[in-house]
Image (tube, rainbow, N blue to C red):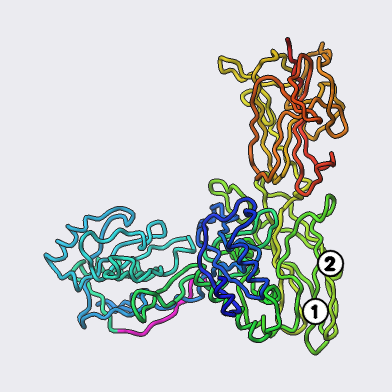
Amino acid sequence: MLKAMDDGVDVISMSLSLPEGMVGSLPTYDPVASAAQQIKDAGIAIVVAMGNDASQSQYADNLYHETLPSELTSIISVGAVANSNFPLIYTATDEFGAEIHYSSVYPITAPPDGLDVYFLTGSSCGSFDWGSIFDDIQTSGNLSTTIIALSVSGNCPLTDIVCCGNTSPPYLFGFYNSSTNPFYKDYEGLLPYRFNNGTTKPYTVIEPDSDIFYSNYVKAGGYTKYKLLFNNSTYINPPMSIGGMVDGYSNWGPLRRTFELKPQIVAPGGHILSTFPESIGSYGVISGTSMATPYIAGCYALVKAQFPHLSVDEILISLQTTARPTAWIWNTSMLATTAQQGAGLVNVYDAITSATHVSLGQLAVTDNNRTSFGLVNFTVQNSGKATQRYNLGHRPAGYVYERVGYLEVNQLPSFGSVEFAEPTFKLRPGETKEIALRLSPPNLAVSIARLPLFSGFIDIVPEKGANLSIPYVGPAYSPYNMDYIFFLAATATSPGLPWLSFPDQSGNSNYNYGFSAVQLSASYAFSLSVQGWTTLLRADIVPANTTLTARVNAVNFTVPADYTYLPSTNELGSTLFGKPSYGNIWIYEGLRQPSSSVYIQGKNLTVTTDSGANITLGSGDYRWVFSVLRWGGNETQPEDYDTYLGPIVRLLD
C-alpha cells in the first residue's frame, strides 16, 4: 500500500481481508489502519472488497459482517451486484431437435455425431460409486465421448459434488431443478479448475431445459441411445433472474455504534467473465466482491480523470449520490436495506455529468442529543448554467435486526418517515442551499433487544439532469433513551430478570422476590442483562430505606406485612447520585456490547467506599442498585443512567 503511494498512484484496488473484522475498538496502533489513513490523507483512494461471507437465505443473520480493512473509515468498501445477464451460454441440440443451453466459457468441441449422456440416479447430495459407474460406461460406451449428467439443486449445487474417484471424465453436467429460491434459478458459474485440476470440465443447465432433457433422455432409452450434438459455437447472454440486485454472498454492514455504511456502494460482481490464472489467455465466470472492487476503482479513476482537483471524499460522494438503489431479491416490491447495498449500484456516467452536487454521500440517523433524534443537514449546490427547481423525496428501504430467529425474514417492510423543512426549492447557477430534515423511525417491529435498524434514501430531484439520492441507516429507537436493563417478570417457574439469590450448600437458589434474611457469611449471586452499548456499569449497596428511585424495581417486590427497617451497623460513608450509599460492590469500565449478561457472585457484602476503603457490611437491611450508563451519557449525571433497585436483603449476625 505504501509502495503504491510512493509510486504516485491515484487509486488502490485491493481484494484481501482479515475475517470477522473488529468487534470493539481498533488497537491503539494498527499498521493497516495507520497506512490506510496516511494514504487517504495523501489524496489517494483505497477501494477494498467487502467480503463474501453473507448468507443467501432470507432467514440469515447478516448484519455487521465487515472485514478488515474494508471496515476502516478511510476505506471505500464495495459490495457485489449480480450481473444483469449471464456472460456465456451455448446451445446443444438433441436428436429430437430440442435445444439444451449450457453454461461454459468456451463451446464444447465434439464429434459430428455428438456425445453420449450417462445420467446418474440418486441424490447429488450423496456419494456415488464412481468405480462402478465408469465400469458400466466402458462396458457399453466410451468415457471420452460421454457426458456424466446428474440432477443438482440449490441445496446441493454442482460445485459441491465430489467427483470422480480416481478417474477424470471430460464432461460433467449439472441439471438444475425448478426452485422458488431466486438464487437457484440462474446458471452456476464454476471455476475452470474446480474438478480434477481442470481435467473434468463442469457445465450447468437450468429449467425449462432440464425438464426437456429428462423427458427426451427417457424417451430415447437412456445411455448410448440419447446424444447431444454440439454444432453451434454461437453464444447468448440470457438475463439473470437476480440481475441488478445485491448478490447473496456480499457482506453487510453497517459499522457498529457509528452506523457508517459499509459497503458504501455496490457494483457488478456476480457471474462476471474475467481473466483467470489457469493458463495464459484463460478466462472464468467468477462471482465475488473482488469482481466488483476493480469496477468501482475504475469508476473512481474516470471521475478523478475528469475532475483531478476533487478529494477522495468528494469523488466518493459523487459516486454515492448518483448510484441507483436496488430492490431486495426476496421481495422486489421494496428496496434492499442500505446496510446491504450502501448507496446502490454505481452509475459513473451520472457521477461525471451531474450538474447538481450534494455535500454528503450517506447519513447516519441517530440521537442528536438526549431529547432530539433524526435531525440531519446537508447542502445542495447547482453547478449548472441554468436555474433549477428541486424536489425532495423519500424512498424507504429494508428494516433489519440482530439475532434473526428460525424462519424470521431478515428484512421487513417497516419504514420510517421524513419531515422536510422545505421540500421544494430553486437554485440559481452556483447557488448553494442548506437542507434540514428530520427522519423518524417506524414503530418497533421486533424487540428493542434485537437492536433494529431502519434505512432508506433521501431523493434530490432536479427539473433536468440526473436524480440524486443519499442513503441513510440508523437505529429504529433512541440509543440514549432505550431501556438498557432488560426486565422479565418472575413466574412460578422462573425468577425473571434481574434476579438476586442466596444459594445454599444443597444447590437451592433461594431467589429473593422482595425480602430475604440471610447470614452475614451467606453466598450471593446476581444476574442482569444489558441491551445497549455502554462504557460503564456498576452495582452499589444502599440502605433499604433509601429514597433513590429507579426505572426498574425488584421483580414482584413484596415484603412481610410486619416489616420494620433494621438499620445497618455500618456508617454511610459514600454517595450514589446524591443519596447516601455504603459503597460500590462491583464496577465495569470500558466498551461493553449489547445483549451481554452480568453475573456477580461472592460471599459477604464487601464494598469500596468513595474514599477507596474496602468495608465488609455488618447486620442490617440493604438494597442493591445497578446502574448502566446510557450511550452518549455523562457518568457524573444521574439522569444519564438506566437503573435497577433490588429487593431488601437483611444480613443477620
* Numbered mark located on residue 436 in the image: 2
At x 83% / y 28%, what residue is drawn?
574
Left or right relative to 26: residue 534 = right
Give whichever of discs 2 and 1 has the lower sequence position.
1
Residue 95 magenta-highlighted? no
Per the image, the residue denoted by label 1 is 381
Q: Nearer the viewer, residue 630 or 233?
A: 630
Q: Nearer the viewer, residue 304 or 81?
A: 304
Left or right relative to 120: residue 315 = right
- What range of the chain is rendered magenta? 232-243
Please state which amino acid type lies under the numbered disc 2: Ala
At x 61% / y 59%, what residue is drawn?
253
Left or right relative to 297: residue 442 = right
Counting from the top left corner in percent of width and height, residue 491 is at: 66, 26
> In the structure shown, which secondary structural element does the residue marked by tag 1 occupy?
strand
Residue 239 magenta-highlighted? yes
Residue lying at the far left of the rendered structure: 139
Counting from the top left corner in percent of width and height, residue 52 is at: 50, 62
Counting from the top left corner in percent of width and height, residue 315 is at: 68, 77
